[in-house]
Amino acid sequence: MSEIKFEKAMSRLEEIVEELEKGDLDIDKSLQIFEEGIKMSRICSKKLAEAEAKIEKLTKDKKGELISELFPVGEDDAEQ
């Protein structure tokens, strides 16, 4: 089974919020889709964290010139 993409998880999360906001669901169905919403939220957070780790940030060096620098991925990378 392939991993769900960010856009699909975000779209499903939006659908879940809309369903819950309507208030038409019984408690069991509400809990079921709430749990699914938590799962989609975690997927989105994970994907955003992965993307952030890949984004280059621009910083100035000692001469004031812009350089590109990768975000550290973990503590091991931050020490380098």
Image (cartoon, helix red, strand yellow):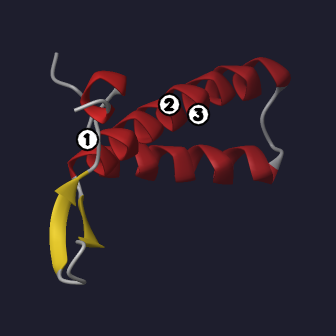
Task: Report the quarter where the N terminus lies.
Answer: top left
Q: Which residue, given by chain and number where applicable, does mark 2 sit on?
A: 42
Going from N to C along the chain, the mark reached first, 2 or 1, is 1
Alpha carbon separation for disc pair 3 and 2: 9 Å
Q: Amino acid at mark 1?
A: Lys
Going from N to C along the chain, the mark reached first, 3 or 2, is 3
Between residue 56 and residue 5, name the one nearer to us: 56
Establish if 41 lies above or below 11.
above
In front: label 2 or label 1:
2
Q: Amino acid at mark 2?
A: Arg
Q: In the picture provided, is 31 more to the left or to the right than 37?
A: right
* Category of crowding for the residue at label 3, using alpha-carbon neighbours closer than 10 angstroms: few (below 14), some (14–19), many (at least 20): many
In front: label 3 or label 2:
2
* Category of crowding for the residue at label 1, using alpha-carbon neighbours closer than 10 angstroms: few (below 14), some (14–19), many (at least 20): few
Q: In the picture provided, is 25 more to the left or to the right than 51?
A: right
Tell me which residue sits at (25%, 30%) in the image. 77
Q: Which residue, given by chain and number where applicable, does mark 1 sit on?
A: 5
Alpha carbon separation for disc pair 3 and 1: 15 Å
Going from N to C along the chain, the mark reached first, 3 or 1, is 1
Q: Position of residue 45 (x, y in %)?
A: 46, 39
Question: Which type of secondary structure does the marked residue at label 1 adopt?
Answer: loop
Q: Position of residue 19 (x, y in %)?
A: 67, 47
Question: Which type of secondary structure does the marked residue at label 3 adopt?
Answer: helix
Q: In the picture provided, is 28 more to the left or to the right than 53?
A: right
Establish if 8 lies above or below 63.
above
Residue at the extreme front: 62
Alpha carbon separation for disc pair 2 and 1: 12 Å
Question: Residue 35 appears in which quarter of the rendering?
Answer: top right
Q: Position of residue 56 (x, y in %)?
A: 21, 60
Q: Which numbered disc covers residue 37?
A: 3
